[in-house]
Amino acid sequence: MADENIIVTEDLARVREIEFVSAFAGSITKLMEAIGVARKIPKQAGAVLKAYKATGTLGSGEVAEGETIPLSPYQTQAVDFGEITLKKWRKAASAEAIIERGYDQAVDMITDEMLKDVQKSIRKDFFAFLATGTGKAQGDTFQAALAQAWGKLQEAFDDDGVACVYFMNPLDVADYLATAPISIQTAFGLSYVENFMGLGTVILNSSVPKKTIYATAKDNLVLYYVPVGGGDLNEAFDFTADDTGYIGIHEQADYTNMTATDTVVCGMRMLAERVDGIVTATIGAGA
């Protein structure tokens, strides 16, 4: 009879799954901290996420003695954030590939590469979302464009002491970075600089088009996600996820075709309460 504490194949698969989700969650949590995203809203079954924008006009305030003070007309308008797409990926390594290349090369190395590609997919969706911002700015140089974007954010969020975050292509700031005494950090495949030129946090990534800067207030961003580690999804499927619940993975052996299969799911969407609070600044004279 086998010792009850012996480590079996299923236990090792569980360890690999935990390593996968921990690597993902640790990286994206660090990015969320750099960007300043404090609001993370899990998707609830049957719920539709909405934001409300208040609009109106304040009266002049000049009211003669004894006259009725006129009402200032204000109203709220609902903004529907829409739904999240649960993305699904799967890969399989054959028994022959494992025999030929070894388990580490046939399965583990490919799983690591798959994690990087999942991160790329999420980054791509995020930058595509930033491009939908309606604020506009322009400057002849990247410093000028960055300053103009900062100015537009101060104007848009004039009620707040706004903390800003900017996204730009590293090639647009390469000359400045070569001589500036700054510290570049990395998270989720992105490089970032905190307190850049005293204007806020700058995220550097080649997914941002050249000669373009995306800027917004940190408090304007919201992470909306499908909780993979609990809730309704886990009632039907057995995914390994960490405490964040952002991503899940399930590894199993399929004996019908002798393959080791990994299934990965993730549903994340970055949103903004105010689309007009996302500014696209163009770098270049006469742009």
Image (cartoon, rainbow, N blue to C red):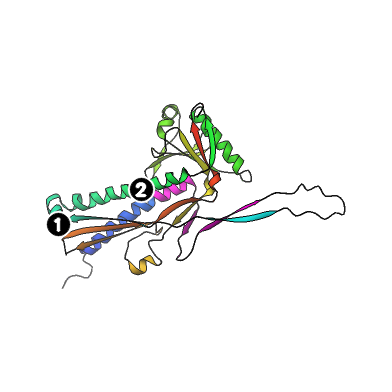
Occupied quadrant, residue 19: bottom left
Residue displayed at 63% across by 43% down = 158
Image position of 239 (left or right of 201): left
Q: Position of residue 52 (x, y in %)?
A: 58, 55
Start-end of magenta stretch: 27-55
Residue that carries the numbered disc 2 in the rendered image: 121
- Look at the picture and state if 102 lies above or below 172: below
Camera-nearest residue between 277 and 186? 277
Q: Amino acid at mark 1?
A: Ala
C-alpha span from label 1 to label 2: 29 Å
Residue displayed at 48% across by 58% down = 41
Camera-nearest residue between 254 and 72? 72
Residue displayed at 28% across by 50% down = 114
Residue that carries the numbered disc 1 in the rendered image: 95
Of badges 1 and 2, nearer the viewer stands 2
Name which of mark 1 and mark 2 comes first in the sequence: 1
Camera-nearest residue between 283 and 24? 283
Q: Amino acid at mark 2?
A: Ser
Q: Position of residue 9 (x, y in %)?
A: 20, 62
Residue 122 visible in image: yes
Residue displayed at 15% across by 60% down = 258
